[in-house]
Image: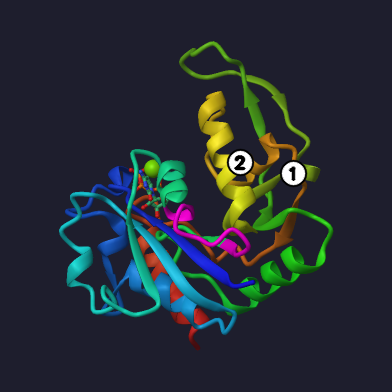
Amino acid sequence: PPIIAVVPAAGVGSRMQADRPKQYLTIHGKTVLEHTFNALCDHPLITRVVVAVSHDDPYFDALSVARAPWLTRVTGGHTRSESVLAATATLPDASWALVHDAARPCLSHKDIDALIQTALTSSVAGAILATPVRDTMKRAQPDLTEPALIAHTENREHLWHALTPQMFRADQLRAALEHAQQAGIPVTDEASAMEASGHAVALVDANPANIKITRPADMPLAQFYLSALHD
Ligand code: CTP
Ligand code: MG
C-alpha cells in the first residue's frame, strides 16, 4: 500500500511573532514549507503529499509547488488534529499516513527510512520519531504560585520527546482521531490519539536536529541544521 505524507500547515505561528505564518518564512531562498516538502519527496517510497492549508491563507498559491501533480491541498481546521483529520479524509483506507509538521524542515532521509522500516516490520500499529530526554525533568506543584514550586523530579530514564513524522494506517488514524475528538481527549500528536484507542506505537530514536520551528531563535538553528543536512 502507498505511503502518503500528510503535512499540517494551517497554523498561524503566533509564538513566532513574524509577519506571516512560520511555514512561509524563507531559509536559503526557499520557504520552510518547501524545504519540508523536499525532505519528504526526496524519499522514493513517498509518492504523494496531502497538505492542510488555512481557509484564508494568501501565501500557498504563490509557491512554485502549489499545483504540483503529487500534491493535494485540503482546508485545515482550528487545531492541528482537525487539520490532520481533514487531510486523512482524502486517503485510501489501506494507505499509510506519514504525518509531518510543516514547521519541521530539517528531516533527514535516514530518519524517514528508520521510521518506515519500524512501522512496516514491527508488530505495532505504527511508529513515531522521538528523541530521549536529556535534561532533568521537574514536575511542578499544580497550584500556580510565583515562583512555581517543584513537586518532585521525574525519572527521565524512560522519557522521550515526540517528534514527527508519525506513521500509521490511514483508516486506523482517522478512526482514532475521530474517537479522541468525540470523547474530548486532548490530542497534541497522532500517537496520543492512537494510544487513546489502545494501539501499540513504537518509538524510533531520531536525530534531534529535526526541530519544530516555534520561536524566533529557532530560525537560525534550522538554517544551520539544513546546511548540515545537505553537506
Ligand atoms: N497546524 C495546523 N492547523 C492548526 C494549527 C497548527 O495545520 N490549526 C500545524 C502548523 O502549521 C504546524 C504544526 O501544525 O506545521 C505544528 O503546530 P505549531 O508548531 O503549534 O504551529 P502553529 O500553531 O502555527 O504555531 P503557534 O502554536 O505558535 O501559533
Ligand atoms: Mg500551535
Say if residue 162 shows up in the picture: no
Q: Is residue 182 left or right of residue 23?
A: right
**What residue is at 50 percent from the left and 60 percent from the top?**
91
Start-end of magenta stretch: 87-97
The location of residue 48, given as percent across then percent down, is 47, 74
For residue 141, which quarter of the picture? top right
Q: Is residue 34 left or right of residue 58?
A: right
Q: Main secondary structure of the magenta part?
A: loop
Using the image, tell me which numbered label, if any, was put on residue 155: none
Say if residue 122 shows up in the picture: yes
The residue indicated by pointer 1 is 199
Q: CA distance from mark 1 to mark 2?
A: 9 Å
The reply to whether discs 1 and 2 touch (Cβ–Cβ < 8 Å) is yes
Q: Is residue 81 left or right of residue 154?
A: left
Is 11 placed above or below 213 here?
above
Most foreground residue, 137 or 24: 24
**What residue is at 68 percent from the left and 70 percent from the top?**
116
The residue indicated by pointer 2 is 176
Most foreground residue, 18 or 53: 53
Q: Residues within 10 Å of mark 2 (few under 14, many from 20)?
A: many
Looking at the image, the residue that sits furthest to the bottom is 231
Q: Amino acid at mark 2?
A: Ala
